[in-house]
Image: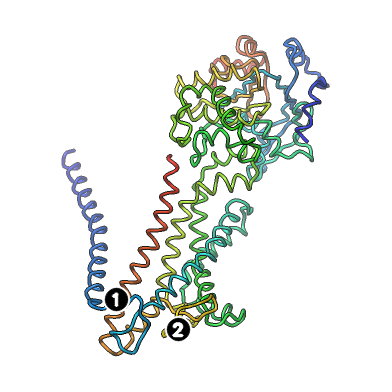
Amino acid sequence: MTARRTRSHMYEKAFIGLALAAVVLPLLLLAVLIADVIVDSSGRLGFDFLTGYPSRKPEQAGILPGLAGSIYLILLTAAMALPVGVGAALYLEEYGKKGRLSNLIEVNISNLAGVPSIIYGLLGLEMFVRTIGLGRSLLAGAGTMALLILPIIIISSREALRTVPLSVREGAYALGATRWQVTRKVVLPMAFPGILTGSILAVSRAIGEAAPLIVVGALAYIAFLPDSVNSPFTVLPIQIFNWVSRPQEEFLKNAAAGSVVLLATLLILNSIAIVLRNRLQKRRTW
Amino acid sequence: MLIETKEKREAPPRVRSANLTEVVAIQNASVKAKLQVEGLSAWFGTNKVLFGIRMQIPENRVTAIIGPSGCGKSTFIRTLNRMHEMVVGARVEGQVRLDGQDIYAQDIDPVLLRRRVGMVFQKPNPFPTMSIRDNVLAGLRLTRALDRGRGEEIVETALRQAALWEELSDRLDEPGGSLSGGQQQRLVIARALAVEPDVILMDEPCSALDPIATARIEDRIHALKEKYTIVIVTHNMQQAARVADRTAFFLLGELIEYENTNDLFTAPKDKRTEDYITGKFG
């Protein structure tokens, strides 16, 4: 008895140790990475860097067009992808008939979420840039990004809608509410924090993407800010990629500083979304 | 359509059937039938779960449905407010007349019907994103029937009817999910009452509650039958004996016996009823 118990205790301790390592190691690596990037960017990161335009001289080059382009692109992408994605999820979960067709659609959406982003770039190039004729514009880029994150938003929104218990829906129907009233006033408010969580993850993915935008034709060198949705644009990852591929050693510092800006942008946007979500969540207790 | 039938209520129920005991029992009590069920069968897909039920549910009385698990008692009351058909593949045949009007007729909107036939479920299901006040008003808000300015009055009336006002009058802004199970179930009853239905269906409303909370709900059922017609499904025979004026025994999707509660429990006519109430099965 005692021998077996001590052995199972040993297993448990070993498992806890492994699990702890699995938490600590990635965090450590991430910390090292961030520290390394910050050290590399030393001296470059400053107000001038944030407000400057690209230049042949590394010490004068700034990131403003990339930063502005990234923020515009993300806002546009979210504005396109969120209503469509949540709408699609609502239809599939609340209205659409469950059957072979809906299963087929579900499998396809899951697969789409795994398609490499460069493929979406090619689709965006053919569809938005050429067929619709948007050219190498912010709108074409945002459309491509919206397509890229749409499957993720649909999947996570459906998951969130599924967590609303049948008993609560039935309670609303039994009061004489129509399907739309139940969806709008009972189901959606309960699912909203979950939908937002999925959307934050999806949009975060879009911020870091460079490949599909290169295909769509975002430019590396832009000496002005986008003034409309039809403007050419660049984004932070493309600017960083461009600096990294320069032969001059000095540009690597710019790339590192750009990475810090990209990380900070990501963190700020995510925090805003999370604060927003928590504020909504606070209203309910289970 | 359904709303208009309120004027027709005075018309005597058409009793065409030959089931004399039932007719006599209802007439003796000088009560009219609120709900008349005729040849009602129900299916889940190809699985038939109710077989030609016919019964008359008297107005302003409590009618209990008892029977072992899987006997179709929950399905039965879900056919009375057309919640049964919400399940994919579920369907119904036969008639259910509310004040003489068939609720399965073509021109009946189930959404409007459910405002006249409210329902309380087995598991308390307050809306977690809403405050206690909003939960009570939910039925009116959802359906845009709330008369501004009458909100507070409706909340107080409904909570008093559900015996919650004393406990909760100063906590109306707290979330509905913060209450105990028994309070949640009474909140859900208040929510159903605020819509002012004619009939309240209760599907094992106390099965998740402790004896004290159960006693409170039963006390409410007694008080509420003054104004409402109540149909309660219960797997607890003592509860049926305590709250119901009439009791129906269901077995395997059939109505076996339907009598005044006292008669059913003291002198069951059918052997199967006797076996069930004496605990030989179920």
Q: Chain of mark 2?
A: A
Tell me the quarter of the picture where residue A133 sits: bottom right
Q: Is residue A77 above or below residue B276?
A: below
Indicate left or right for A14 with A151 as reference: left
Q: Is residue A251 above or below residue B182?
A: below
B164 and B273: which is toward the camera: B164
Tell me the quarter of the picture where residue B64 sits: top right
In percent of width and height, residue B282 lies at: 54, 24
Mark 2 and mark 1 lie on one chain; the one further toward the N terminus is 2
* Residue occupying the point 55% across, 78% down: A230
Q: Is residue A178 above or below residue B95?
A: below
Residue that numbered label 1 is attached to: A257
Residue type at mark 1 is Ala
On-image quarter of the N terminus of chain B: top right
Residue that numbered label 2 is attached to: A219
Mark 1 surroundings within 10 Å by alpha-carbon count, few (fewer than 14), some (14 through 19), many (20 or more): many
Q: Chain of mark 1?
A: A
In percent of width and height, residue A194 lies at: 46, 52
Residue type at mark 2 is Leu
* Residue occupying the point 67% across, 40% down: B85
Indicate left or right for A18 with A261 as reference: left
Q: Is residue B146 above or below residue A41?
A: above
